Amino acid sequence: MNKFILVDPGKCIGCRSCALACSFEHDDEFNLSLTRISPLWMTEIGRFIPMTCQQCEEPLCLDVCPRKAISADKKTSAIVVDEDLCIGCRACFLVCPFGVPVIHRNKGYMIKCDLCGGSPQCVEECSQQALSTVESDDAALRKRREAAQKLQALTEKISEKAS
Amino acid sequence: MNGILVADMERCTGCKLCEIVCSVKKEWVSDPPRSRIRITIQRGGKNRLPTFCQHCEEPLCAAVCPVNAVRKDESTGLILLDRELCVGCRACVSACPLFGVGFDSVENKALRCDLCHGDPACVKYCEAGAIQYVDRDPFPTNKQRAAAKKLYSP
Amino acid sequence: MLGYAGSILIVDLSSGKIEKVPLTEDMARKYLGSLGINAKLLFDHTRAGIDPLSAENVLIFGAGPLVGTLIPTASKSDVSAKSPLTGLLGTTSSGYHFGSEMKYAGYDHILIKGKANKPVYLAIQDDVVEIRDASRLWGKDTWQTIDLLQEEWKSEEIQVAVIGQSGENLIRFSAIQNGKYDAWARTGMGAVMGSKLLKAIVIRGKGGIRVADKKAFKQVSREMRQMIIDSPFFEAVSKYGSMAAAGVYGKFGALPVKNYQTGVIEDWFQTRGFKVLEQYSDQKMACPACPVGCAHWAVVKEGAYAGLKIKGIEITPVFEIGAKLFVHDMDGILQCAAIFHRTGTDIVSGCGTIAMLMELYQRGLISEDTIGFPVPWGDVETICKLIRMISKREGIGDILAEGAKKANLALTGNDDYAMTIKGLEILSFDPRSRWSVWTFGILTNTRGGDNLRTRNPVENLRFPSLPDDYRTEPFGFPEEFYNKIDMPENVKRKIINPDRKTTDIILMEKWSEDLIAIFNAIGICTRPPSLQAQGPTSIARMLRACLGWNIDAEEVMLMGERIWNLQRLYNLREGEKREDSLFPKRFYREKLPDGPAKGMAIDPDQVNQMLDDYYEARGWDRKTGVPKEAKIAELGLGDEWFSVVLP
Amino acid sequence: MVTKEPYPLYSACILADYIADRIPRQRVFLRTAEDYARAGIELMLARPVLDWSPERHMLYFDDGALRYDRLVIATGSRPLIPPVPGIEKDGFVALKTLRDADLLRMAHGKNAVVVGTGPVGIEAAIALRHRGWSVSVVEMLDRVLPRLFDLPLANTLKNRLEKRGINIFLDEKVLEILGGTRVEGVQTDRRALPADVVVWVIGMRPELTLLNEGQLLLGASGGIAVDRHMQTTQEGVWACGDCVESEDLVSGCTGLFMLWHNARLQGRIAGANAAGAGKRYPGSVNITTINVFDEAAASVGTLASEVSPGERKVLHRRSPWGELYLVLKDTCLMGVQAVGRTERVGGLIGIMLQGKDLRKTLVRASSPADGPGLGILRNVRKDLLHLFG
């Protein structure tokens, strides 16, 4: 029942507020190379896609860490990094299917989304509601509900046409 | 110049050309065991894993070296080995969690990738494109882009 | 320095010398940021009367103190140089990511002087600045160049300022492209870059910007965002971008149809109004930290231009190509816009020049033989061909490349059909049908006939405003909005009349020019939602939180006035006269033939009177427009003033 | 910096190489006096501290005293020498310092006896063999390197040592050092061995002679107890190196882990924290590598003999390029020993740290991208699964 940041790429307008808020919260400066969330512009599909940690249920990064520096936070259930243990070997980056863990340029340890200890700043700064914090169970539920609504809308359309 | 090697294990064919190229470039002899990049072919040949130095930020190999022969070059961030100082104790070989350090049993010294000073030969010769030399700068990595492409393409 | 990156990068292309000098706190405190410091640098680094396309000219990129932070809409950067088109101050803003990337790389300003001996591009990665060979890029269009550079740098994250063939061939209205779809377009900055044989600037910054007070900063940036969202125009602009206004001007009969021959197009709203947007894409695109996201991603799905992908169905290309050149459909408009972007040409000036040619052709003042082919209104292929010819200076393109005014003179011996002010082609709506702060502003603008340096923060587009009373403009906002306007009470009472029916154009002009100068200097966008949300008080708050300065609203407005006067002094130094502040002749001579404003023309006497009053209000000499000594003393611009008055 | 050593920092780990003449003497040094001067450190060599007063913040020498605001104790370890008769004789060397190595190099004769088969003992034996001595090794326990390897791998190494002409006597206890003023032999409970030099390396103890009773809290293992920030129980006093007790990152046990890299990291952290930083020591990683006549062997984690027989599982694999020995407790990886390709030890540390059920890990390891550690395990997957039943 991990909490994570749900991304709605259809709403993102690529303003990078999330990325700026992220580095500001964690490092007190606006620095896009220290951000834990990056909205990327994908020309092929004409969408911005904010990429951030999915807080996997069984994270590969945690499995491969040669120093056990990655663990699930007890309070927020976010997958977090122990700065003292991390040796910056990038093994987590290599195995992460999303390429999310990155090395802090100045401090030498890995950084990734830690849900800001429970209230993610990127979500708060997103003016388009493209980001939201959800429990993974909720997400599944919401997806199902959306699908149901689409179906309903479709049937209504058809019945309108028929009448 | 500020880059690292990244291996695409799905693309690696296990041809070991990189090992030959590396040993020839660095040792002037075709001797794959003396290459700085190694392909570990797992049982049955199903999985192939190119391994090489990841140039960790706080490397264990430097920590265990009893003679300070491994040091971090502050300007490039590379972990470099001073072969003059190395006494061949293999502590770094054992300590590296990522198979990153090799051992030259001819000269009795550790072997470590120096990224050919920004122009890695293994990358140039890899036919399959399994080894890439990428910017180590985090924001936003091409890998994230590739993942996003896969995730959301129709 | 907090907020600022703290350095100015000076690159001398002649000698290859690259230098990083600190941006002093004194300079920042006096000229604030991009627009202001750019003007100061231009003033100091060039002699009076230089040839804009010579090695003596300098090209300056500047990003303001709030750019790169989370302050909503703070993303604008400014490019300045002596303009090859007007011979006066060249200055042009653009949003997108280049400005913030400059700051991340550690530079508030980049000043390029001299001239390379072969095509080069400038590669900036934080402290590592290199002048690299660009022979293989020379001759390529901007999109190809960007693709090649992204491939070379193995990253799509690099920010690129690049010129196309237009800049290379010194077209006087060529643009510098800011990425593929944005541009520092006006006043011919691309030609200055081209004259230096500088094909592109690639920038990649990994540094950060720190601010003075984290807590206060967070609070003020969130409040500002909320204020923008609460603006009466937010919904429309965030939904339709600047296209929200396209329909309104159509209704006023203020469209620049066929080079301002008329103001009306019957099917305007159906073919070129904001509703058309929905057929192209639902993807909005924003500049950094902007909650509005006024640009739109457009994909042409079918027809002759199927597959074309471009950002920004915006009012400018739609007005310029759709009305001025009379292109009927959005596909065609997008196709023309893409060619403008690819060749690196200013859409406004380009359309103004082509429209001039088309009108000459329509009136039989120029024959098909001279051009080589017919140039009927609204033909997309002809327009694209003309843009390409201009960008390569081929055939008639060589004459057109000099800008509408010079080309008109060269072709017919007079400039009757060149719609320019101070040599710069004017844009958008017809001043005869709507006289407002904006209209008068294109006359007083320091860079010539362009409106983006004067926007009335309380402009209300619901009312047509016809020029029987030149002094005032309708106000028309509810009381609560009046109370919200960020303006000192005494100023507010002077500008807006007591029963809140009208605003005083002259006083509002001065106010908004100073305010917009500040907006541009700190890098905040001038689109209506942010314009209505922010004023000197909120700007002072943001500067306090960000820079740690003890600054109040009064000082902010004084800075704006200083920047405006500095620009004026530069223009005076380069020889601007009062007589140059003149609308194109058509607006005085010809009445609008139809539409709601049928029969209207501009009265030259009224305009003259307005200018007198405006100079007076600015503390300038009533007749010559030279700033008076008292005003100069107040602003602390003594050195600059003496170099102009006693050269 | 105050030390009783007459030399600036040198590497104790490579004394054997120096003894074997594989490196010149100056290479043993890692720092020169100038290095300290350049860093602004006042170096006081050969100044043994005789007494310490934590209350008064004073250190006392035989000829003076020194006041401090903050203190970092890094006194290291001393050789463990039980009261065996004859240890005062010439030719008896407890190999610990550079001076001991110098003594050993200057020794004359033909026969050497090394007592103790820890890494130092084995390396010393090899080094002496290189110098042409006839070497015998005496070990009290049933195998060489008893704290690093279980019997199978220890036997492999023993064979290798014997093949190169080193005599090894296991399960023997030294009773007496024979001779007059000079060492002439060693008497064990089974035999008498001729010896011109005796190298005594049965272990190390923390060097705590400086401390008076109750000044600092000591741990169960006898080392100084420190918290995660390397701070002792005294305000303003930090301690690091061989003299402190630390936690093993792999097993979680507290103990003395006298390894160079642990000491070095502790030193950096203690120093930084004494200067006001808030760094945390993650724990010790006790990986030991040893070279036995150009074949490497390495070990980390728990030995099979330390796991109760009911839970213990062992996987021993031989291949042309070496041997791998995995120690499991139920389904968790607890220790790894390797001869030959020692990088496999490092590769598996991460998996040991996770402490996860290996069956789960193996089932999940479907992607080739999951790193070297799982790669090794996958190679022995069949055997492992067989082991788990």
Image (cartoon, grey):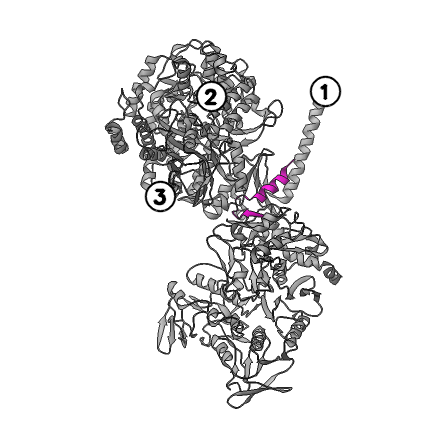
Residue labelled with disc 3: C22
Residue labelled with disc 2: C397
Q: Position of residue B69 (x, y in %)?
A: 50, 63
State the separation of the CA atoms marked 2 and 1: 61 Å
Single out the mark in the foreground, 3 or 1.
3
Camera-side residue: B133 or C170? C170
Tag 3: amino acid: Pro
The reply to whether the magenta stretch includes residue B144 is yes
Q: Is residue B72 above or below residue C619?
A: below
Identify the subunit bearing mark 1. A
Q: Is residue C120 above or below residue C430?
A: below
Q: Which residues are magenta?
A: B132-154
**Residues at discs 3 and 1 in contact (Cβ within 8 Å):** no
State the separation of the CA atoms marked 2 and 3: 43 Å
Q: Residue at x 54, y 61 (%)?
A: B61
Residue C457 picture quarter: top left
Q: Which label was assigned to residue C339?
A: none
Q: Position of residue D289 (x, y in %)?
A: 59, 67
Camera-side residue: C504 or C647? C647
Tag 2: amino acid: Gly
Q: Position of residue A51 (x, y in %)?
A: 57, 42
Camera-side residue: D36 or D4? D36
Q: Residue at x 23, y 28 (%)?
A: C646
Single out the mark in the foreground, 2 or 3.
2
Q: Which label was assigned to residue A163?
A: 1
Q: Is residue C121 above or below residue C416?
A: below
